[in-house]
Image: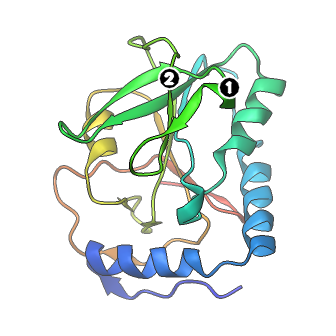
Amino acid sequence: MKSITFVIMLKAEIRKQALKDRLILNDLTYQELNKSLLNQFKTLDFSKIKTLHIFLPITEKREPNTFLLIDWISQNHPEIKIIVPKADFETALMTHHEYLGEEDLKKNLYHILEPQKGNLHEGEIDMVIIPLLAFDKQGYRVGYGKGFYDRFLEGINAQKIGLSLYPAIEKIDDVNEHDIKLDFCITPTEIIKF
């Protein structure tokens, strides 16, 4: 599999290239990468985790299939409460809801699956699995550019874990003070600690 090679780039360029690289993945490669991500995820320490916040994948954009992770957590750690986000595109803020299963999810206008009846969660969150298009060796990430996760992560004290189908790039040039650094990033071959 071809790996993304960026030298030092700006978020807009990285975003464009990462999306392009993800969309050319064939089904078999995509499935294999997701299985490998799950295998890495299984090695995390969940002993102190009571609440896990996890994004739901936009499969049209070849995002990591977090349903594999959700199913594994549900089966192996039923004591962990799973929370999923719902985005408000007018305020660029998210609300957080109890995950009730795939039957409670519905796509919004942006093809993002969202919970419909899951109770609002306003308590502590111990671990957040964060979407990204790319990340660098310093632990910064490039998302879709709306800042939903940076605003959310600013106010919480949780383990921040990125999920990437590709390895780290060298450096994101235009990191700013609003960008929240990851604690770890899971790739198909390793878990990187920052």
- The residue carrying mark 2 is 116
First reached walking from the N terminus: tag 2 or tag 1: 1
Q: Residue at 60% x, 25% y: name it.
A: 104
Residue 80 located left or right of residue 133: right
One can see residue 169 in this view: no
Q: Classify residue 28 by image quadrant.
A: bottom right
Q: What is the spatial separation of the Cα atoms under label 2 and label 1, in whole angstroms?
A: 10 Å
- The residue carrying mark 1 is 101
Total tally of numbered discs in the picture: 2
**Residue 157, numbered circle:** none
One can see residue 109 in this view: yes
Residue 24 located left or right of residue 139: right
Q: Position of residue 167 (x, y in %)?
A: 58, 72
Q: Amino acid at mark 2?
A: Gln
Q: How is the image coloured?
A: rainbow
- Which label sits in the foreground, 2 or 1? 2
Q: Residue at 34% x, 43% y: name it.
A: 149
Mark 2 and 1 residues: CB-CB less than 8 Å, in contact?
no
Q: Is the residue 146 above or below the residue 48 in the image? A: below
